[in-house]
Image (spheres, coloured by chain):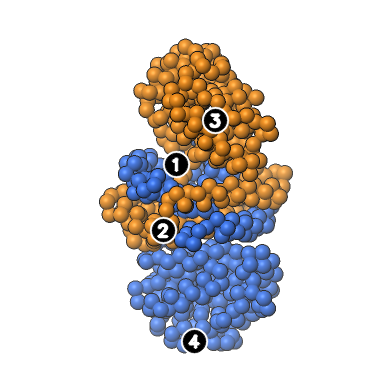
Chain colours: A blue, B orange
């Protein structure tokens, strides 16, 4: 088990802390705001039953602790930066941190918006800064996107991958930084066409929602888009798909939309979202928080029952 | 219950026939190929346990039957066209069919590639032709995409919607024809970015697959992309998201890729797909066929337990 320092006690920082602590790591959240301790305790309380349901709560794991300053916490073996997305702030806090930790301690940034190079600028040991981006909340969502710099030691990334994987996370490696990493790029690609369908008046948002949640998502729980097209190609799989449907795929891509989020489109999205699901946002969120771990657990069980030895998917 | 004539006894036609028959409709498949009867019986055998697992197999439902010619089947109340995607063939068969059925019998085309107007060209009563596109296999996948022509009577579309909904289908309405309808457009939009990530060397297909199946799909089972962004906007929902993240969304969209399916990309997809899941295609397909109804059933149960009265999602 490692000693982990989470820098920043906001929603992501506290969520990360719960994930680390629940997995048995000795976890400290550093944040100058005294109210952090209470917030952290609240997230920990919310996270524990979720992790228990997912099977990712280690027996005897202890609550994460809060420190006002880095020097009040024990020397970390991993720093997880979860500061607000403000590059100047990140630079200041990391410069100060480097004076208090060993030169080879890895620093993982949770940033969704900045490249690791931009965040590492001005650091005394910039090569130790890499991205480890969670989906929110980190104690529930399994993916962690890992993006190093060219100078980051392979071993450091491999160690980080092993640590997150040991927490039950699905580590996704990127060979180079890209805006939005993997998960968000894929999500925004689908969302763009969803908005196009609504903006062009071809379909209601309610029907777009059902096309995704009933038509696409259950199959995608079992295999990604590659697997879907692999199976559409008959016995020769992906090669068969490319030969038979490659040109049709490119024609389809050319026909996809590139909508703007202008006022009329925004209004349509707002109105149609309320029509599709009129419940208060908090009620929808609560239903999701209850149901999502159940879906993840059910899917994991079905996958592990149905898979031969060969399949990762 | 209706008397349904399925035109064409290929994979989609036999799959449709199983879905109609399983729901209790008196179902006839018209196909000049004498081997159709055996194929139909095989699909019916495969479909019954799947529909039973989904709760969509009506007790006492009878096997669909085969007729070599339309005049050998009883007069239909609905025709489901499931011929090969060959416009000339569709025109010839539909012209012949119209001489044998009443003038107001609705004709639903399963076409994924042609507009209803193009298919109806030359028909004596073209207004009765509309698209009702299933996902494959129709007895398993819940969505049916319904696209009429401007001349198609509203009541005819409403009746068709009620009939499919009565079979447990999720009917998605399109206000105008678009290449790929809803489900495929959304699927191809995500697939385009997946291919871009692989083609640009940013990530392996295996990690893209896991980003979708573990990072995105479980949440999408509970809500579509609209719901995801609705919840990201705090208490004001979609409006809050648009105000806070509208410009960032448009910037993300501008950064998405537009890959070509050239030889190098095709090779990368083939090799990386084999690496991601080395099992024979037939084995992957068999595992999916076993697991998908289970996922759909589990998700439906979780959704119905977690939803308040107000939510459709």
Residue B17 badge:
3
Query: Cα distance, mark 1 to mark 4?
Result: 50 Å
Kindly state the secondary structure of the residue where label 2 is placed. Answer: loop
Q: Which residue is mark 2?
A: B278
**In front: label 3 or label 4:** 3
Q: What residue is shown at x 43% (from left), y 85% (from top)? A: A104
Chain letter of the residue beneath label 3 in the structure image: B
**In front: label 1 or label 2:** 2
Farthest left residue? B263
Residue A215 badge:
none
**In front: label 3 or label 1:** 3
Residue B85 at x, y = what percent? Answer: 39, 30
Q: Which residue is mark 4?
A: A101
Compared to residue B160, the image places residue A44 above or below, namely below
Kindly state the secondary structure of the residue where label 4 is placed. Answer: loop
**In front: label 1 or label 4:** 1
Tag 1 or tag 3, which sits nearer the N-term?
Answer: 3
Discs 2 and 4 carry the same chain letter: no
Tag 2 or tag 1, which sits nearer the N-term?
Answer: 1
Kindly state the secondary structure of the residue where label 1 is placed. Answer: helix
Chain letter of the residue beneath label 2 in the structure image: B
Residue B90 at x, y = what percent? Answer: 41, 23
């Amino acid at each position: 088990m490692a000693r982990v320092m989470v820098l920043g006690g906001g929603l992501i920082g506290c969520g990360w802390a719960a994930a680390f602590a629940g997995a048995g790591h000795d976890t400290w959240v550093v944040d100058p705001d005294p109210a952090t301790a209470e917030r952290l305790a609240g997230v920990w309380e919310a996270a524990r039953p979720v992790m228990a349901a997912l099977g990712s709560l280690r027996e005897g794991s202890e609550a994460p602790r809060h420190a006002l300053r880095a020097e009040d916490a024990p020397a970390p073996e991993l720093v997880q930066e979860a500061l607000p997305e403000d590059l100047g702030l990140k630079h200041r806090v990391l410069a100060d941190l480097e004076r208090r930790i060993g030169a080879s301690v890895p620093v993982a940034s949770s940033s969704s918006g900045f490249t690791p190079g931009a965040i590492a600028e001005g650091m005394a040991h910039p090569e130790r800064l890499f991205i480890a981006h969670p989906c929110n909340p980190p104690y529930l969502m399994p993916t962690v996107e890992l993006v190093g710099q060219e100078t980051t030691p392979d071993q450091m990334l491999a160690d980080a991958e092993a640590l997150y994987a040991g927490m039950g996370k699905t580590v996704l490696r990127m060979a180079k930084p890209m805006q939005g990493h993997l998960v968000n790029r894929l999500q925004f690609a689908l969302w763009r066409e969803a908005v196009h369908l609504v903006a062009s008046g071809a379909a209601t948002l309610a029907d777009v929602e059902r096309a995704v949640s009933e038509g696409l998502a259950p199959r995608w729980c079992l295999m990604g888009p590659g697997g879907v097209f692999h199976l559409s190609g008959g016995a020769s799989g992906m090669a068969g798909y490319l030969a038979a449907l490659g040109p049709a795929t490119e024609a389809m891509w050319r026909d996809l939309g590139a909508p703007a989020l202008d006022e009329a489109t925004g209004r349509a999205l707002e109105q149609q979202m309320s029509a599709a699901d009129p419940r208060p946002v908090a009620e929808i969120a609560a239903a999701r928080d209850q149901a999502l771990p159940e879906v993840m657990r059910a899917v994991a069980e079905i996958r592990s029952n149905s898979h031969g030895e060969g399949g990762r998917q």
